[in-house]
Image: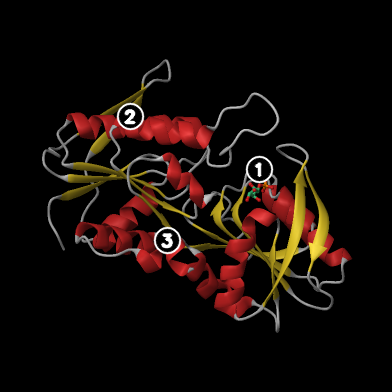
């Protein structure tokens, strides 16, 4: 294992950072993160990082703004402490959904966050299942967009009914759903979703035959659970078998999300631990699949200038 690196954890998902460090044979670097009484963040790296490669593990999960600012401040602290390089490991990359302007005077937050990270001193980004992979183009620095599809496929495989159909809940997820269907060797169906608001979606079309079939609904992220719930209802109405399974890389699982999906007929949910999941009280419903081995493998290869091709979404065709 190469020496000359340290792993720092933000506060968004310390267990994940600890697991990654352990798999790399290291302990987490010492770093104090505090809030001033007025809410400002104060970061102090408590040991020398001069000449070291610094990997900061911080998903920008809710509360998104707090975790993003903390990451920026940690990167600035590492850069000013003469780190040889600063890599932001952002397993869940928030603000990625706004990657273009639609019909009003909006910000393109994915681009804005890319600019902020680079300004703060980040020289490399490692992330997982970026909402729109082309957002990599917003950066001038290398971005390695890994995919958790293989680990989720391995986790869900033995829970599926016979001859299931993988279902993409909207057009944006067709490529990801195709990867699931390919890896599982099953058929694909696609729903067309119209987003009415941040909390309300409407499914308008179903392409594919789901009659008398079990369904595996897949998505990159689950926030309110509205997309999966609405999709499950549509599939049941189209003749799919009950007891559906849902699978997503990032389980933001806002309050009410689990209840919403269960009420719509979802019986099991698989998410990774890119986002720290609080709702593990319902372990028979929610399965949390670890991504530390994927992240640690990627970092190990980065440190050795090795290829990440087959770990990346783009490398899987
Ligand atoms: C949207 O394009 C995303 O891929 C997800 O489908 C969406 O963000 C899920 O959000 P929610 O769970 O609130 O419907």
Q: Say whether marks 2 and 1 touch (CB < 8 Å).
A: no
Display colour scheme: secondary structure
- Decide which of 205, 6 is in the foreground and name it: 205
Separation of disc 1 and disc 3 at Cα?
Answer: 23 Å
- The residue singled out by tag 2 in the image is 119
Residue 84 pos. (x, y %): 16, 41
- Decide which of 115, 73 is in the foreground and name it: 115
Label 2 residue SS: helix
Label 3 residue SS: loop
Residue 55 pos. (x, y %): 27, 46
Question: In percent of the image, x 29 and y 65: which residue is there?
Answer: 307
Question: In percent of the image, x 48 and y 35: which residue is there?
Answer: 111
Question: In percent of the image, x 51 and y 41: which residue is there?
Answer: 94
- Residue 73 in view: no
The image quarter containing residue 185 is bottom right
Question: In percent of the image, x 35 and y 59: which residue is there?
Answer: 295
Separation of disc 2 and disc 1 at Cα?
Answer: 34 Å
Q: Say whether marks 1 and 3 touch (CB < 8 Å).
A: no
Label 2: few (<14), some or many (≥20) within 10 Å?
few
What numbered label is drawn on residue 255? Answer: 1
- The residue singled out by tag 3 in the image is 291
Above or below: residue 41 compared with residue 273: above
Label 1: few (<14), some or many (≥20) within 10 Å?
few
Quarter of the N terminus within the rendering: bottom left
Q: Earlier in the sequence, mark 2 or mark 1?
A: 2
Task: Say whether residue 268 is left or right of residue 196.
Answer: left
Residue 20 pos. (x, y %): 31, 57
Task: Say whether residue 4 is left or right of residue 226.
Answer: left
Separation of disc 2 and disc 3 at Cα?
Answer: 28 Å
Q: Say whether marks 2 and 3 touch (CB < 8 Å).
A: no
The image quarter containing residue 280 is bottom right
Above or below: residue 191 compared with residue 77: below
């Amino acid at each position: 294992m190469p020496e000359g690196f340290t792993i720092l954890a933000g506060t968004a998902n310390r267990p994940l950072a600890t697991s990654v460090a352990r798999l790399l044979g290291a302990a987490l670097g010492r770093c104090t993160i505090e809030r001033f009484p007025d809410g400002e963040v104060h970061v102090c790296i408590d040991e020398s990082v001069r000449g070291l490669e610094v990997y900061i593990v911080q998903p920008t999960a809710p509360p998104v703004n707090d975790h993003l600012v903390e990451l920026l401040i940690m990167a600035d602290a590492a850069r000013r402490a003469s780190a040889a390089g600063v890599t932001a490991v952002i397993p869940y990359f928030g603000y990625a959904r706004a990657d273009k302007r639609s019909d009003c005077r909006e910000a393109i937050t994915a681009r804005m966050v890319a600019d902020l990270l680079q300004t703060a001193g980040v020289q490399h980004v490692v992330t997982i299942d970026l909402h729109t992979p082309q957002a990599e183009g917003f950066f001038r620095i290398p971005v390695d967009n890994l995919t958790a599809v293989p680990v989720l496929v391995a986790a869900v495989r033995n829970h599926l009914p016979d001859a299931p159909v993988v279902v993409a809940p909207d057009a944006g997820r067709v490529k990801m759903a195709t990867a699931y269907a390919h890896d599982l060797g099953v058929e694909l169906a696609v729903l067309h979703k119209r987003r009415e608001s941040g909390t309300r979606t409407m499914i308008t079309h179903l392409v594919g035959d789901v009659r008398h079939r079990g369904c595996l609904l897949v998505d990159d992220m689950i926030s309110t659970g509205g997309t999966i719930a609405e999709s499950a209802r549509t599939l049941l109405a189209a003749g799919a078998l009950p007891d559906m399974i849902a699978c997503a890389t990032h389980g933001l699982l806002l309050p009410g999300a689990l209840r919403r999906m269960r009420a719509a007929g979802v019986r099991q949910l698989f998410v990774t631990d890119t986002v720290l999941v609080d709702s593990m009280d319902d372990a028979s419903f929610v399965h949390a699949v670890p991504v530390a081995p994927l992240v640690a493998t990627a970092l190990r290869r980065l440190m050795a200038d090795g290829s990440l091709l087959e770990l990346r979404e783009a490398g899987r065709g």
